[in-house]
Image: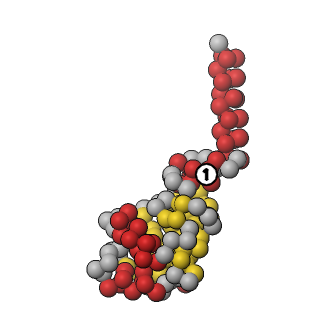
Amino acid sequence: MKKAAYVTALLALCGYVTLSLSRFPNWIGRSEPNTAALFSPPWLNFDATYTDGSVLEFRIGMSRSELSSALVTHYQDNSLLISGCGANLKRVAPDISLQSPEAKAILSTSDVLCVNSRKLTVMLHLRDDALLKVRVVVTNTEM
């Protein structure tokens, strides 16, 4: 009986490692980044950049106005909008709303936007008023 339990545990571990090393985390990260993070040992953090297709509520190539609508619809109540992410931090809007002057200015002029919502950070890169790439980061463990 013990041998069967060891074999089962070993097979489960092999399956987990195989999934972790495959494209599965990036594929599922397009729609469920928190789940993708579970397949990113050892820290269970996830980081992927997408340059085509759909990612979360966004579509590569969508216009700035479509992007603004998606941000307001899906992130208005629980997120922070940041212009120029990280070291290039320029402006912060505590409320993603088309009525907020800060958010309106950020949404209409910034070529790099960050949306922070708890453990999830979404970096949106625009060029010529169209979405060029999306970086999705889930931070479960700070290093």
Residue at position x 32%, y 75% from top? Answer: 97
Q: Amino acid at mark 1?
A: Trp
- Check the picture and name the quadrant holding the N terminus: top right
Residue 33, percent from left and from top? 53, 54
Determine if residue 86 is in view.
no
Give above or below for 92 relative to 3: below
Q: Secondary structure at mark 1?
A: helix
Left or right, residue 14 beside residue 81: right
Identify the residue at image location x=42%, y=80%. 107
Residue at 65%, 39% (x, y): give it: 16
Q: Residue at x 32, y 85 (%)?
A: 101
The answer to which image quadrant residue 69 occupies is bottom left
Q: Position of residue 37 (x, y in %)?
A: 56, 51
Q: Which residue ends up furthest to the top in the rendered image?
A: 1
Q: Residue furthest left?
A: 99
Badge 1 density bin: few <14, some 14–19, many ≥20, Cα 10 Å: some
Viewer-side residue, 69 vs 39: 69
Using the rendered image of the protein, determine whether residue 40 is visible from the camera's viewpoint: yes
Q: Which residue is the site of mark 1?
A: 27
The colour style of the image is secondary structure
Locate residue 79: give its quadrant.
Answer: bottom left
